[in-house]
Image: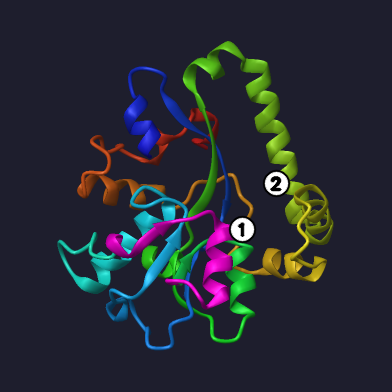
Amino acid sequence: ATIWAKTRGNIDVRCVTAVNSMPVYLNTRNPTVTSLKDLGDKDRIALPAVKVSMQAITLQMAALKELGPGRHGDLDRLTVAMAHPDGQAALLSGSTEITAHFSSPPFQYQQLKVPGVRRLLSSYEVLGGPATFNVVWATAKFRQDNPRIYQAFVTAFAEATQAINADKKAAAARYLEIANDKKSSLDDIVAMLADPDIEFTMTPKSTMKYAAFMHATGAIKQLPESWKDLCFDNLHA
């Protein structure tokens, strides 16, 4: 949404395809924190980027719902930009100021296996349902200049999505091989893929909920008329 709003009328970046719908969890190890209202000055929340990442925007949306109008940015002061592996290490060590981590799969599931760590909220709870987590995007010029490459990619991506959904165990094994993930077992990845909240789909979901919130809070200046404005027309059907 951010790059769409900033490139309208010039390079025109849009979504080529959604990758998946996945919830992101805010996990905490602070036993006294049972809601966002309990987070205090001694708490720090690790997330990928302050104010602009999906996790940061979701946290603002949650703060608006729980703390009230005009208070969506109240928790920004507690956020710290950290890569997911670093944020997880800081959270689980118990010896840093990081008492919460807003991450993504597989990190959030790994954390919940550690005694004392629990989920504080899920993005699905904030949004009222499933939401796209990853997208592939491109410029209009790239699409115009490379129509065969663009179409080949979209077709291959559709095949890959079908393959994942058809055989999740094989997909999990391929993931472990490609990602060189030493912390997860095959059973761990299969269990994540079997989570009913996780869906590999090219269909965008809840994008307008994010866009509308970002426009209302001034994060983007232009509000798309619909989700189709954010996406190339190969997705419109």
Image coords of residue 140 (percent x, y)? 48, 20
Tag count: 2
Q: Which residues are magenta?
A: 76-98
Marks 2/1: CA–CA distance: 10 Å
Q: Is the residue marked by circle 1 packed among few (<14), some (14-19), or many (20+) residues within 10 Å?
A: many
* Mark 2 lies on residue: 161
Q: Quadrant of the N terminus?
A: top left
Image colouring? rainbow
Image coords of residue 46 (percent x, y)? 45, 62
* Mark 1 lies on residue: 199
| Magenta span contains residue 142 | no
Return the residue nearer the eye: 130 or 8.
Answer: 8
Q: First in sequence: mark 2 or mark 1?
A: 2
| Magenta span contains residue 87 | yes
Can residue 22 be spotted in the picture?
A: no
Residues at discs 2 and 1 in contact (Cβ within 8 Å): no
Residue 204 vertical position relative to residue 169 in the rendered view, above or below: above
Relative placement, left or right, of 103 versus 68 is: right
Amino acid of disc 1: Glu
Return the residue nearer the eye: 232 or 182.
Answer: 182
Image coords of residue 12 (percent x, y)? 41, 23
Q: Residue at x 36, y 74 (%)?
A: 43
The local secondary structure at tag 1 comes to loop
Amino acid of disc 2: Thr
Residue 140 vertical position relative to residue 209 in the rendered view, above or below: above
Return the residue nearer the eye: 56 or 150.
Answer: 56
